[in-house]
Amino acid sequence: MRNIIVITGSSRKNGNSDLLANAFIEGATKAGHTVSLFEAGRKNISGCVGCETCYSTENACSFNDDFNVLAPMIENSDMIVFCTPLYWYTFPAKLKAAIDKMYSFLIGRRKRKGKDAILLACGDAHNDGDFDGLSKTYELILKSIGWNDAGQLLIAKTYKIGDINKTDGLEKAKNMGLNIKDKIITI
């Protein structure tokens, strides 16, 4: 069974991306996986300042914020799921700040490679290319940190709370969770 962390990016409680995360979590737990949730959009996470003192104390970041709670959760997982609304064609600021601080795994020489990742996203996208910035950023992050893309689910036309219920996105997210394989991909 997999140890999965779902990191959400929305500051809006019970919004479309929360529903998407919950559907995925429902599927994954039903399949027998262990799932933890970290709501980055509702946490105190400041941006990385590039001081390169990562892990010089007992924490991932020398500055004490909620990333120091998230870092061990990531380290102890074998799958990371980013679940986010689309903000200006990419990640929202709090989630991006958490991602930026993952730089600490490189500086601190932490075991990081071989994890699988999934991107679940929804937003007020109306054109085929509206998710391109988010998707490409996600792919480059995975390449840099040595993680494997296990899938992307991008749901358009979801601006108002509940719009995702008018799509097949929740069903697809639940099925993604149900169909996660136990095999850990290694590089």
Image: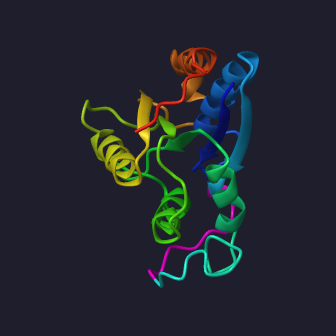
- Residue at left 61%, top 46%? 7
Residue 13 visible (yes or no): no
Which quarter of the rendered picture does the N terminus lie within? top right
- Residue at left 55%, top 19%? 176
Residue 21 visible (yes or no): yes
- Residue at left 60%, top 30%? 20
Residue 26 x %, y %: 72, 23
Residue 19 x %, y %: 65, 31
Residue 85 x %, y %: 50, 43
Residue 12 x %, y %: 65, 49
Which quarter of the rendered picture does the C terminus lie within? top left
- Frontmost residue, 73 versus 38: 73
In the displayed structure image, the side of residue 89 where residue 176 appears, left or right: right
In the displayed structure image, the side of residue 155 where residue 178 appears, left or right: right
- Residue at left 64%, top 81%? 63
- Frontmost residue, 48 versus 23: 48
Colouring style: rainbow
Vertical arrangement, residue 106 with respect to residue 30, above or below: below
In the displayed structure image, the side of residue 143 where residue 167 appears, left or right: right
- In the rendered image, residue 175 lying in the magenta stretch gets the answer no
What secondary structure is the magenta-colored segment mainly? loop
- In the rendered image, residue 46 lying in the magenta stretch gets the answer yes
The quadrant where residue 16 appears: top right
The magenta span reads 41-50
Vertical arrangement, residue 28 with respect to residue 125, above or below: above
